[in-house]
Image (cartoon, coloured by chain):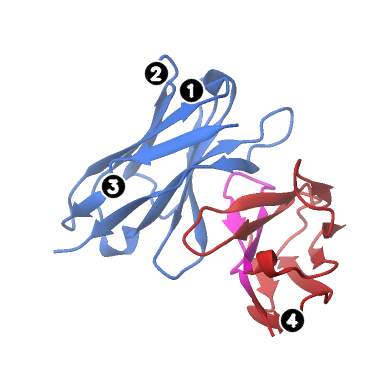
Chain colours: A red, B blue
Amino acid sequence: DIQMTQSPSSLSASIGDRVTITCQASQDISNCLNWYQQKPGKAPNLLIYDASNLETGVPSRFSGSGSGTDFTFTISSLQPEDIATYYCQQYDNLELTFGGGTKVQIK
Amino acid sequence: QVQLVESGGGVVQPGGSLRLSCEASRFTFSSYGMHWVRQAPGQGLEWVAFIHYGGNNKYYAASVKGRFTISRDNSKNTLFLQMNSLRAEDTAVYYCAKDFGDTRLPGIFDSWGQGTLVTVSS
């Protein structure tokens, strides 16, 4: 299995702050990397696919970058509605795996 | 937009069986691969299984291989997960998810259901 190491596991930031989450794959996965947002009690929601493509309807303050083994997810200006847990996920092969998640809270 | 509605969850004893369903609407179900993803209480996400749009190719996580079977009925726009030999560690909310499709490798979950809770306990 490809292991996905996501950090930090949690963070606190102020409204308007820039927030960055990293995800490292245990082997080269090219750009086969997605990011999801999950609010409490809700299903996850796709934000970014293929490492850097913004899903339709997702606000432009969300972005992703990276390739190979190292990836970054950024919220350019944190909003109250962004309080959630964020997950990276690889699809380089059909043993699909997720990172452990990053819980984002307001300071 | 895409609608996915899971059903069939409940409480089952260890070693028991359960069949989950996911009814799809507002998209051409027969044209897309479909997944099951689960989430144990308070834990992260775990992919469970995938089935190609035609139903011929199926893939499973190692943790469920040989115990779970994914299937679909394209005439009824419905996805299934047959779960046998259930264990306590299978306790989770089970989500069905639509694959992004097109020419990419399978594995982008672009729409999700609301989930159904499966509890394995004596």
Q: Is residue B70 above or below residue A50?
A: above
- On the same chain, marks 4 and 1? The answer is no
Residue type at mark 2 is Lys
Q: Badge 1 local density, few (<14 within 10 Å), some, or many (20+)?
A: few
Q: Chain of mark 1?
A: B
Residue type at mark 3 is Gly
Q: Secondary structure at mark 4?
A: strand
Q: Look at mark 1 in the image and give the residue it sits on.
A: B56
Q: Which mark is residue A13?
A: 4
Q: Look at mark 2 in the image and give the residue it sits on.
A: B76
- 1 or 3: mark nearer the eye: 3
Residue type at mark 1 is Asn
- 2 or 1: mark nearer the eye: 2
- 4 or 3: mark nearer the eye: 4
Q: Is residue A5 above or below residue A1?
A: below
Magenta-highlighted residues: A84-103
Quadrant where the N terminus of chain A is found in the figure: bottom right
Return the x and y of residue B60 as percentages of the image width and height.
46, 44
User: Residue at (73%, 67%) from the top-left corner?
Assistant: A23
User: Residue at (79%, 52%) from the top-left corner?
Assistant: A59
Quadrant where the C terminus of chain A is found in the figure: bottom right
In the rendered structure, does residue A95 fall within the stretch colored magenta? yes
User: Residue at (66%, 49%) from the top-left corner?
Assistant: A46
Disc 4 to disc 3, C-alpha distance? 37 Å
